[in-house]
Image (cartoon, coloured by chain):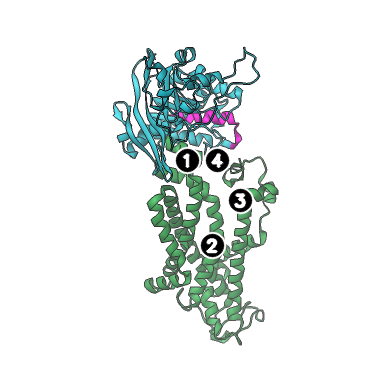
Amino acid sequence: MAVTDTNVLQMTSTASWRQRIKEARLPWVPLAIIILVLILGIFSELIAPFDPEASNLKARVIPPFTNGEHILGTDILGKDIFSRLVFGARTLLQVTVPAMAIAVLVGTAIGLVAGYSGRWLDAILMRITDATLGFPSILVAMLIVTLIGTGVWGVVFAVTATTWARFARMIRGEVLGTKERDFVLLAKILGVSPTTIMLRHLFPNVINTLMVMISLTIGQVILLEASLSFLGLGMKPGEPAWGIMVAEGRAQLLTVWWLALLPGIMITIVVMACNFFGDWLRDYLDPKLRRSR
Amino acid sequence: MENEVILSVNDLRTHFFTRSGVVKAVDGISFDLRKGETLGIVGESGSGKSMTAWSILGMVPKPSGQIVSGSIVYQGEDLIQKSEQDMRDIRGSGICMVMQDPLTSLNPVFSVGNQVLESLRLEYTESKQTLRDRAVDLLSKVRIPAPETRLDAFPHQMSGGMRQRVVGAISIARSPNILIADEPTTSLDATIQLQYLRLLKDIQEQTGAAIIFITHDFGIVARMCDRVAVMYAGKIVEYAEVEQLFDNPSHPYTEALLESVPDLDVDVDTLPSIEGQPPSLDDLPDGCAFAPRCPVAFEKCSVYPGQYDIEQGHTARCWRHDGS
């Protein structure tokens, strides 16, 4: 049974966890970066040496690696860039985590219902999904921020509104295949209700796909948030968000180049880490590639 | 054998409306199922055996498949008139089915116990521990060794025969009155097959359930069934008690089927087979559907034959028994 032995949920404890980690060939670098961002975001106050919002006019425009106190330098108002980057990680988490959670929840629910019930409900839900996917996400996001307003929740909803449809379509596709399998039929024969079938029999069998989708989408969500902030539609100006920092540094790109460069590098690294992790996860959960190892 | 009829199927017609025409998968079949008895439904692939089962369960594939007429009376009520919600309550607790393929009937991501419990939870509202005891009980009933530890095993850790027995346990968890077994042994080894059939018999004796046994194996019919319905092209062509059928097969199709079963006492080089192919169900001949392949067909066979009594409880749809 190809499907059975690939499922991470039920790996038997025959091999020790050390051995299993070794065999999994974990992507250490991307994993370390993701963990680092989590630590930076959660323990920002402890890590950042300065208040990210406090300006210090005596220490303006210090280039990175030239000052012992301000390791990564300061901006034109004398705000410590390292501290701002650290708090930027928190802003990132504040937007990405709820946005992904809502998008995954909504998308999965719609995908499950559409895929399982089929027929007209499927048709309606999938046309809505298609329509959502048809718009360029940045435009929809801009529209929503304009309606709701900027700030964390504005961005969260903007990101959710543009991301749920990908999950919905992906999950629906998986469900279409899974619902034809015999254990779903057996559940129906036993008189199990549709809701229970969806939650107990279909959902656990699409988790693999969902995990991969999440890790591959996070990168895009981070980019979208940064883009919105860059355009002045995300977090409020002055807040320590990486997108805003890039936008603010744009004007002085030729003179105070590190203002835009440092947060830019951060965005690039984190997005790449998420994508590499997603790639690894996809390969890891793919039965065919597993077999060949 | 008790004589109380618990399921009565009358003139059931399940048709499929496809682009190429109407496929008459089940075309006017009638039979009664009595308490505690085993009814065999025999026929080749595509004769409508399985679709009869799905019709009884109210699970005809929609929208193309529809029960166009007839009635399925269970506990005094016509199942065809029931809503999906009501049917869901009847499925599992009243009428249940054992599926063909044990290898795919279990959800790979849950432990076996989890899946047995799911079925139990639909019937009983008891404490976790009581339900678990019941599950252990069920597994030992289907003769799974060390049921307490097996409860936490995953399907892929079990053999095919064992999985089949788990599926059996899940099906009888809510002690249904009627168990439909749709070729439950085709994917098992011969030795396991025999074990499983004995098990089904035991379960029947313990629970008093009636079994509808769908198969194409006359050996199983002889071993398991009290009465047999032979299906051909969506119709029951012969309906009899097992002894009557084997002693006095009255439809040419039944005769031909029985002849093609190998007999160990007689040494033959080639087994007889039935010439030709079963007819396509969307283009049935007006007369007897078996006539084109029938060795004893005559002019009258171009008109559809009625159902004629051969003896008490034994009918056949063949003009030879017209009496004239």
Q: CA distance from mark 3 to mark 2?
A: 17 Å
Which residue lies at the image location 49% right of the left edge and 36% below the top edge?
Answer: B115
Residue B172 in the magenta stretch? The answer is yes
Instruction: Find disc 1 in the rendering and name its residue.
Output: A184
Q: Residues within 10 Å of mark 3 (few under 14, many from 20)?
A: some
Say which amino acid is labelled 2: Thr
Q: Which mark is residue A285?
A: 3
Nearer to the camera, A5 or B50? B50
CA–CA distance in space, label 1 to label 4 = 11 Å
Check disc 4: other Cα within 10 Å, few if <14, some if 14-19, many if 20+.
many
Q: Disc 4 on helix, strand or loop?
A: loop
In this rendering, the answer to whether A52 lies above or below B49 is below
What residue is disc 4 on?
B108
The amino acid sitting under disc 3 is Leu
The picture places residue A192, in percent across and down from the top left corner, at: 41, 38
Q: Colour of chain B?
A: cyan
Residue at disc 1, secondary structure: helix
Q: Is residue A10 left or right of residue A15?
A: left
Chain under disc 3: A
Disc 2: host chain: A
The colour applied to the residues of chain A in this rendering is: green
**Kind of residue at badge 1:** Val
Badge 3 vs badge 2, beta-carbon distance below 8 Å = no
The answer to whether residue B89 is magenta is no
Q: Nearer the viewer, residue B71 or A83?
A: B71
Query: Residue B108, percent across and down?
Result: 55, 40
Three-letter amino acid code at disc 4? Pro
The mark nearer the N terminus, 3 or 2, is: 2
Asked if labels 2 and 4 share a chain, the reply is no
